[in-house]
Amino acid sequence: MAHGVCPWWLGYWLVNPLRRLWESPVKLLGPFVRESMTVLEPGCGMGYFTLDVARMVGPAGRVVAVDLQERMLAGLRRRAARAGLLERIEIRQARPDGLGLGDLAGRVDLALALHMVHEVPDPAAFLGELREALAPGGALVIVEPRGHVSAADFTATLAVAAGQGFDLDERVKVRADRAALLRRVG
């Protein structure tokens, strides 16, 4: 697994509207996101997925968007304010040693690890934090980019997730090459 954080300046490219031609947030995440949910999105960047998820959870829902880089979060704040969605999005800056999710323990319905697990230096600790934040029966969607993550590395990530208390939900197909839906055990 690679462990380099995406540079902040690439955030502008990542939110390019043309990206929707090959990766639609609504098509990818629509089967999993419901109104009134609390959704956690670590590694949110400038919010390519965040804004659509905020629309899907509706006014009674909440998206907790977390990123390590303040410049990414500043871009997300601007985009969310322009879209009129800022009140649905709680923006947090992660610490280098963790996400700081203790106050969310057992309260998150869905976590989204989208194109970012390969950037995390300690996937076991990261996935453990997500598991603790999830409510019993909560779900985790992991999507990794084919160009950065081999099939073997993705399988290794799923094994690490299993070791952190997740079961693979094989009944559900996620619309991406390297993707899986996992459920919190217990």
Image: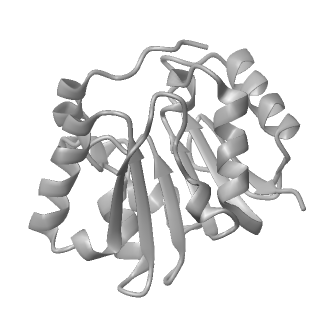
**Residue depicted at 37% across the width and 52% down the height:** 92
Q: Position of residue 99 (x, y in %)?
A: 52, 42
Is residue 83 shown left or right of residue 90? Answer: left
Is residue 161 shown left or right of residue 64? Answer: right
**Residue depicted at 16% across the width and 35% down the height:** 12
All told, the count of numbered labels is 0
Q: For this rendering, which residue is in front, 95 or 139?
A: 95
| Residue 18 in view | yes
- The image shows residue 165, relative to residue 177, as above or below, that is below
Q: Quadrant of the N terminus?
A: top right
Is residue 105 shown left or right of residue 11? Answer: right
Q: Position of residue 91 (x, y in %)?
A: 33, 57
- The image shows residue 54, relative to residue 168, as above or below, that is below
Looking at the image, the residue that sits furthest to the right is 186
Q: Quadrant of residue 184?
A: bottom right
Q: For this rendering, which residue is in front, 4 or 171?
A: 4
Q: Position of residue 20 (x, y in %)?
A: 29, 48
Q: Position of residue 58 (x, y in %)?
A: 38, 82
Q: Quadrant of residue 121?
A: top right
Q: For this rendering, which residue is in front, 111 or 133?
A: 133
| Residue 17 in view | no
**Residue depicted at 23% across the width and 72% down the height:** 85
Report the colour scheme: one colour
Is residue 163 shown left or right of residue 48? Answer: right
Q: Quadrant of the C terminus?
A: bottom right
**Residue depicted at 55% across the width and 43% down the height:** 113
